[in-house]
Image (cartoon, grey):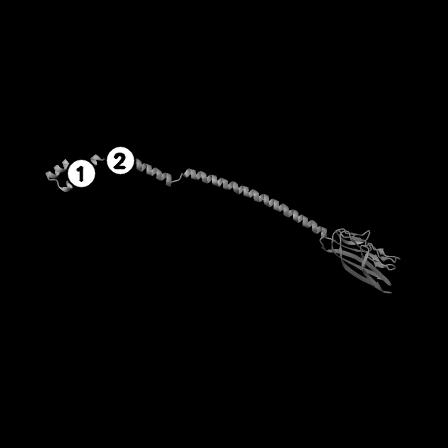
Amino acid sequence: MSVVQQQVDGGLNENEISQQISSEDGRQNPPQTDTLRAEASTDRQQYCDLGIPDIHAALRELTATVIELKENIRALETQLRDEMNKKNEEIFSQVEELRKENRDREIAFSAALMESGNGYIGPFPTEITLTYRNVFTNIGNAYNPITGVFTAPLKGAYMFRISVFGHGPVSGASIYKNGEKVVIAYDNQPQYDLNSSNGVVLILEVGDVVYVKLWPNTRIFDSENNHSTFSGFLLFPLPSQQ
């Protein structure tokens, strides 16, 4: 204050006095340059740490993620392939089972009396089972041309039909199921040709038999024209009782 007072007394103006005071303060308190630089460097480092990620670390992490995704995709592809193969095997097995089931349901036969030539069968004093030897069709082999008997291989509804041909006076035959007469084909014509036919739908269990019997004291004719026939086929299967 003595300096200031002296300068005031010597005639210094007010601005000069303010400048001198500021200069004195600057000499007494110099700027902390090194400290400020250090603080600025620290601030920049903290800014870098907080704002700019490590590019190499990020790339490594991304590469690991891609590899993991590829492994997951391969695992899914293998799983899907195995499931598809298993499904295909199941479908193939089901198709084969259906084919077998359909083959079992393919039952049909048709046959005429005489394998060759022509002539009469009968008359006989009692009924006889006719054996239709000229087999046209025997899908499923349920008809036996040696015995003339059809044996049902599965439960179902079956259609049977017979045709009877002859020359007077009488010709007749009956369809039998398990020893029971079901329907007849009959004609009576003293001097002319006889011609009759009949058919029936029967519900058969496995092992039931169907056949044709010639009436007593009648005769039936057949030739290469196959006049007299016996036919049958499965209409549809029925569920077996549990």
Residue topped by disc 2: 33
| Dot 1 amino acid type | Ile
The reply, left or right, for residue 208 in relation to residue 84 is right
Q: Earlier in the sequence, mark 1 or mark 2?
A: 1
Q: Secondary structure at mark 2?
A: helix
Which of the two discs, 1 and 2, sits closer to the camera? 1
Q: Secondary structure at mark 1?
A: helix
Distance (Cα) linking label 1 and label 2: 22 Å
Mark 1 packing: few (<14 Cα in 10 Å), some, or many (20+)?
A: some
Residue 188 in which image quadrant: bottom right
Mark 2 packing: few (<14 Cα in 10 Å), some, or many (20+)?
A: few
Residue 125 lies, in percent from the top left, at 89, 57
Q: In front here: 56 or 136?
A: 56
Residue 176 lies, in percent from the top left, at 81, 57
Q: Residue at x 21, y 35 (%)?
A: 28
Residue 127 in which image quadrant: bottom right
Q: Are marks 1 and 2 in contact (CB under 8 Å)?
A: no
Q: Would you place residue 109 above or below residue 169 in this image?
A: above
Indicate which disc residue 82 carries: none
Indicate which disc residue 21 carries: 1
Q: Confirm whether residue 226 shows in the render.
A: no
Q: Residue at x 57, y 43 (%)?
A: 79
Q: Residue at x 54, y 41 (%)?
A: 75
User: Given the current orientation, which residue lies at the most extreme right position?
Assistant: 125
| Dot 2 amino acid type | Thr
Residue 100 lies, in percent from the top left, at 70, 49
